[in-house]
Image (cartoon, helix red, strand yellow):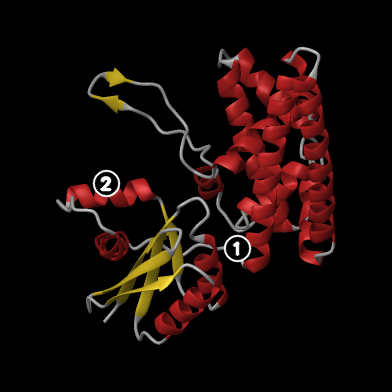
């Protein structure tokens, strides 16, 4: 008998439902609670898949611990689970009900557990997320300082800007020590950064947020990054294609990399120019360039060979 497990994640606790036995329990969303969760789920015979929704950050501790224990955990798109619940007429919402819905969704859809980050990758992901926060706060405070009149307000903003710059500098040094001090990450970063248009920040974002890179098919890579176009049509009506979903930080990093590569990478510049010459809007051409850049990066890590211009 195959067993599926659904885990509803909140800040303070994890609600767990085991299907089809119907067993339910809850543990704290902390180191002690997650340790208990790993032990209890590790005892289940016939365990097929453990599903939990992506919540932004509250699921990271449990995901890392379950993956480290070699348990089959998969992180789900909350919208897909919600739509499945509506399709089967389950509209009530409590944490235990959500956990049982996740278990039913996993049984019906059978998502394949992907490569998930270990504790080190989770830490790097948190460091890169903090870096993005500092960069955003620094840009906002610099803009306020520029617009503020001379006087105490501008002086206050200047002190905050200086403090944020110091914090960003210290964080960058810590990230650099972490990545360069790990042989596997150092090698992967050097391979990624060999591509014109990919700097340290983009390479490290990919290491942290897309650890599967190098093991994916082109379609899988594009889907995970949210760069796979999807069409909308009905009858004779043909809508425009859109991109969406996926991992936002990865998509943003690749978009910035594509903007640079479209100017300084001869191969990708020629690719982007051909699309524009064929009548594609410039934004569409850049998105396509970002998708091609991702496919190139995936192949470079797969083959462990640095960039060589065509």
Near mark 1 (Cα within 10 A), the count class, few <14, some 14-19 or many ≥20, is many
Q: Within the image, what quadrant is residue 258 found in?
A: top right
In the figure, is residue 294 to the left or right of 90?
A: right
Quadrant where the N terminus is found in the figure = bottom left
- The C terminus: image quadrant: top right
SS at mark 2?
helix
- Residue at the disc numbered 2: 83
Q: Residue at x 58, y 20 (%)?
A: 283
**Residue drawn at point x = 49 percent, y = 58 percent:** 58
Sequence-wise first label, 2 or 1: 2
- What count of labels does the image hold? 2
Tell me how far mark 2 sits from mark 1, CA to CA.
27 Å
What residue is drawn where x is 71% and y is 55%?
Answer: 301
Q: Which mark is residue 117?
A: 1
Q: Position of residue 67 (x, y in %)?
A: 53, 71
Q: Is residue 37 left or right of residue 3?
A: right
Q: Nearer the viewer, residue 116 or 234?
A: 116
**Image spot of residue 306 (x, y percent):** 81, 50
Mark 2 closeness class: few <14, some 14–19, many ≥20 residues within 10 Å: few
- Which of 68 and 297 lies nearest the eye of the viewer? 68
Hey, which residue is sitting farthest left in the picture? 89
- x and y percentages locating residue 161 in the rendered image: 79, 32
**Where is residue 40 shown, x and y percent of the image?**
41, 83
Residue at the spot 79% in from the left edge and 45% down from the top edge: 167
Position of 278 relative to 188 (above/below): above
Specify whether 199 is left or right of 230: right
Point out which mark residue 15 bears: none
Task: Report helix, strand or loop for mark 1.
Answer: loop
Q: Is residue 36 above or below residue 154?
A: below
The answer, for residue 31, to whether it is visible in the render is: yes
């Amino acid at each position: 008998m195959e067993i599926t497990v659904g885990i509803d994640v909140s800040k303070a606790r994890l609600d767990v439902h085991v299907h089809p036995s119907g067993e339910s329990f809850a543990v704290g969303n902390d180191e002690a609670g997650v340790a208990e969760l790993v032990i209890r789920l590790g005892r289940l015979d016939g365990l097929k898949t453990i599903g939990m929704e992506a919540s932004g950050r509250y699921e990271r501790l449990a995901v890392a611990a379950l993956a480290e224990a070699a348990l089959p955990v998969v992180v789900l798109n909350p919208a897909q689970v919600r739509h499945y619940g509506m399709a089967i007429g389950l509209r009530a919402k409590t944490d235990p009900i959500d956990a049982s819905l996740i278990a039913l969704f996993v049984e019906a859809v059978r998502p394949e557990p992907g490569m998930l980050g270990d504790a080190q990758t989770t830490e790097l992901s948190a460091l890169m997320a903090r870096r993005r926060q500092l960069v955003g706060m620094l840009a906002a405070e610099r803009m306020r300082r520029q617009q503020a009149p001379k006087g105490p307000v501008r002086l206050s903003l200047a002190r905050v800007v200086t403090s944020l710059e110091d914090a960003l500098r210290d964080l960058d040094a810590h990230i650099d020590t972490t990545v360069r001090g790990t042989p596997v990450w150092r090698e992967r970063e050097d391979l990624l950064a060999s591509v014109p248009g990919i700097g340290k920040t983009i390479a490290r974002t990919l290491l942290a947020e897309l650890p599967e890179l190098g093991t994916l098919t082109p379609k899988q890579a594009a889907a995970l990054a949210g760069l796979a176009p999807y069409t909308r049509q009905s009858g004779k009506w043909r809508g425009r294609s859109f991109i969406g979903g996926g991992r936002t930080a990865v998509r943003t990093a690749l978009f910035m990399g594509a903007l640079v590569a479209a100017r300084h990478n001869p191969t990708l510049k020629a690719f982007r120019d051909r699309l524009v010459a064929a009548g594609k809007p410039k934004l569409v051409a850049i998105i396509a360039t970002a998708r091609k850049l991702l496919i190139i990066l995936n192949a470079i890590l797969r083959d462990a060979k640095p960039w060589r211009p065509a």
